[in-house]
Amino acid sequence: MVKTNKEIRRKQREEVIQKLYEIDINEGINETESTDDYVKASIKGVLSHRDLIDRKIQDNLTNWSLSRLTYIDRAIIRFATYEIIYSNLPSEIIINEALVLTRKYSDEGNNKMVGFTNKVLDNIKEAIK
C-alpha cells in the first residue's frame, strides 16, 4: 500500500510531537534523533523559537497557564503554533492536524481537549493575523 503525502506528513507530525514531548519531559535535553529532515527542521524550529511560541500560547490561554497543560498537549500546541507562525500552510490545515493528534494522544473520548486545543489555536491564529 502506497502512502499519500498527507499520510506521510501526518506521521512526520506525530514524530515531531513525540520528540517535543520527550524533550519537555527531559527538561530540555535534546537527545532525540531522527533521520527525517522535516522532523529535524521542525524540532529545531520549535526549540529555537520556543520563547516566542510559549508567549503566544500563554497570551491566548484563558484561565490557564502553559505549565498546567500536559506534556503531550503542550507539544501539540507548541508545534501547531510554530507552524501557524512560520509555515505557509493554511491555519485551518494546521489546526485540523493538531486536533487529529489531540484526539489520538490526549482526548479521553469526551472531546474536551479537542475543544480546548481548537479554541487556543484559533485564538493564536486570530492574534497573528
Image: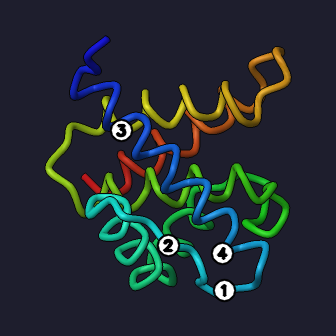
> Residue at 77% of width from left, 28% of height from top?
107
N-terminal of the two: label 3 or label 4?
Answer: 4
N-terminal of the two: label 1 or label 2?
Answer: 1
CB-based contact (under 8 Å), mark 2 and mark 3: no
> Residue at 48% of width from left, 56% of height from top?
16
| Secondary structure category for the residue under label 4 | helix
**Mark 1, residue position:** 28
Looking at the image, the residue that sits furthest to the front is: 1
**Mark 2, residue position:** 33
Q: Nearer the viewer, mark 2 or mark 3?
A: 2
Q: Position of residue 15 (x, y in %)?
A: 51, 51
Up-down relation of residue 39 to residue 114 (above or below): below
N-terminal of the two: label 1 or label 3?
Answer: 1
Q: CA distance from mark 1 to mark 4?
A: 5 Å
**Mark 4, residue position:** 23
| Secondary structure category for the residue under label 3 | helix
Q: Position of residue 87 (x, y in %)?
A: 21, 55
Residue 94: assigned label: 3
> Residue at 31% of width from left, 30% of height from top?
93
CB-based contact (under 8 Å), mark 1 and mark 2: no
Q: Nearer the viewer, residue 14 or 112?
A: 14
The amino acid type of the residue labelled 1 equals: Gly
Up-down relation of residue 53 to residue 114 (above or below): below
Q: Position of residue 28 (x, y in %)?
A: 66, 86
Quarter assignment of residue 37? bottom left
Q: Nearer the viewer, mark 1 or mark 2?
A: 2
Residue 117: assigned label: none
Up-down relation of residue 111 to residue 14 (above or below): above
